[in-house]
């Protein structure tokens, strides 16, 4: 690893991306540009005030008691807001930050003992499986980017490990609420200082975050509010599939498959113990067997293909995706 600041050690494969963000951060602009993940719509570029990012960073620093003696690992894709905020936190509290390329198990080739690590549920699953002793040595683990399944939570409980699951998005400059998961498990998410919640349209969550925006931030997340600072997350109100921390736009995949499949079809996300959700492909056909090559889609390819004689349609003639998938009895 290469040292580029007094407290930054960077893997050469991500050095350019780190330098580009630092250049943007140190520029005279009051904003940084970030790309949304696509959880609540099509990915887009947005401007976030640096003052809001500093506020968010200070919240996390105080919560996890980080300081210049702390040692942290950044192992998320540098394009994500989670990765950018790890850098901002390190700048603000002067903790030592190791910035490595994103991998399925970021601890596999690391010997350092860390005070703070931010990972996805899929990374945490592999860390528990392959690097359990190293996980026990980490003081605080922040998990985000996807829901945590019951198998993972059970493993944490069995190993007496408690992590913090985050709730947030690019528009909120990382997490706005946290909950303990594992050996100690909270039933609800608790708002970070300076943030409160209320119901939006159709019982979806609305976020008030004055440090970032005067206007409330609308989400497509269903939630049960206990009060304006605590909520139980119930799920997303859309068809975006979150597979191992990778956000997959259903419409994008269907568009890419439209010239390949000569039958009515759709893709859908179902529960998966490893990925959180996995993408499946449903085709309306009387054929008993069909073969396709989806490798061009990479990590966004359908994991399973189901052939059905008939899809379920609404009275108005629209495809009912969920009812059609329920016919398969996959125990989602």
Image (cartoon, rainbow, N blue to C red):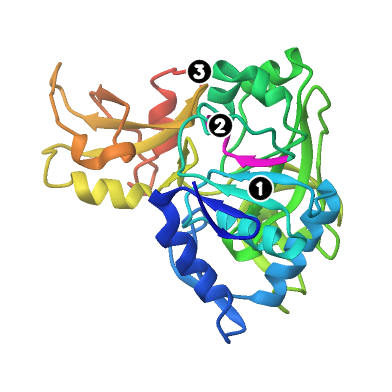
Report which residue position mark 1 lands on.
222
Q: Provide the residue designation for mark 3.
A: 331
Q: Mark 2 — residue?
A: 110
Q: Which of 13 and 239 is in front in this view?
A: 13
Left or right, 182 with respect to 170, comes to right
Q: Distance between the residues labelled 1 and 2?
A: 38 Å
Q: What stretch is highlighted in magenta?
A: 116-123
Comparing marks 1 and 2, which lies closer to the viewer?
Answer: 2
Please tell me whether residue 224 is drawn above or below residue 209 in the rendered image.
Answer: above
Element under disc 3: loop
Between disc 1 and disc 2, whose residue precedes?
2
Question: What residue is drawn where x is 86% and y is 60%?
Answer: 193
Dot 1: element: strand
Q: How many labels does the image show?
A: 3
- Could you tell me residue 228's position as x and y percent? 86, 57
* Residue 109 lies in the magenta-colored region: no
Can residue 230 be seen in the rendering of this structure? no
Spatial separation of the CA atoms under disc 3 and disc 1: 21 Å
Tags 1 and 2 touching, CB below 8 Å = no
Q: Earlier in the sequence, mark 3 or mark 2?
A: 2
Q: Residue at x 24, y 41 (%)?
A: 297
Do residues under tags 3 and 1 come within 8 Å of each other at their CB atoms? no
């Amino acid at each position: 690893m290469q040292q580029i600041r007094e407290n930054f050690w960077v893997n050469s494969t991500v050095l350019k991306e780190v330098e580009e963000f630092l250049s943007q951060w140190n520029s005279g602009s009051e904003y940084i540009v970030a790309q949304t993940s696509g959880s609540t719509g099509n990915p887009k570029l947005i401007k976030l005030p640096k003052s809001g990012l500093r506020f968010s960073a200070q919240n996390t620093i105080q919560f996890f008691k980080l300081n210049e003696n702390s040692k942290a690992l950044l192992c998320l894709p540098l394009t994500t807001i989670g990765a950018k905020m790890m850098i901002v936190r390190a700048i603000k509290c002067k903790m030592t930050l190791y910035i490595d390329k994103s991998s399925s198990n970021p601890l596999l080739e690391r010997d350092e003992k860390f005070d703070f690590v931010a990972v996805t549920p899929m990374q945490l699953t592999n860390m528990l499986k392959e690097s359990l002793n190293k996980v026990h040595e980490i003081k605080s683990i922040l998990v985000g980017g996807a829901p945590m399944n019951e198998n993972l939570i059970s493993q944490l409980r069995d190993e007496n490990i408690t992590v913090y699951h985050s709730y947030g998005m690019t528009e909120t400059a990382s997490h706005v609420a946290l909950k303990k998961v594992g050996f100690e498990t909270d039933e609800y998410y608790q708002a970070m200082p300076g943030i409160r919640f209320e119901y939006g349209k159709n019982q979806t969550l609305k976020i008030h975050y004055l440090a970032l925006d005067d206007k409330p931030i609308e989400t497509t997340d269903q939630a049960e509010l206990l009060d304006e600072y605590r909520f139980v997350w119930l799920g997303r109100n859309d068809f975006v599939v979150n597979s191992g921390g990778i956000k997959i736009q259903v419409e994008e995949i269907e568009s890419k498959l439209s010239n390949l499949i000569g039958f009515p079809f759709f893709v859908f996300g179902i529960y998966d113990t490893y990925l959180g959700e996995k993408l499946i492909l449903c085709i309306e056909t009387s054929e008993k067997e069909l073969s396709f090559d989806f490798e061009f889609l990479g990590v966004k390819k359908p994991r399973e293909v189901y052939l059905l004689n008939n899809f379920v349609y609404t009275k108005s003639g629209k495809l009912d995706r969920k009812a059609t998938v329920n016919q398969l009895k996959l125990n989602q």
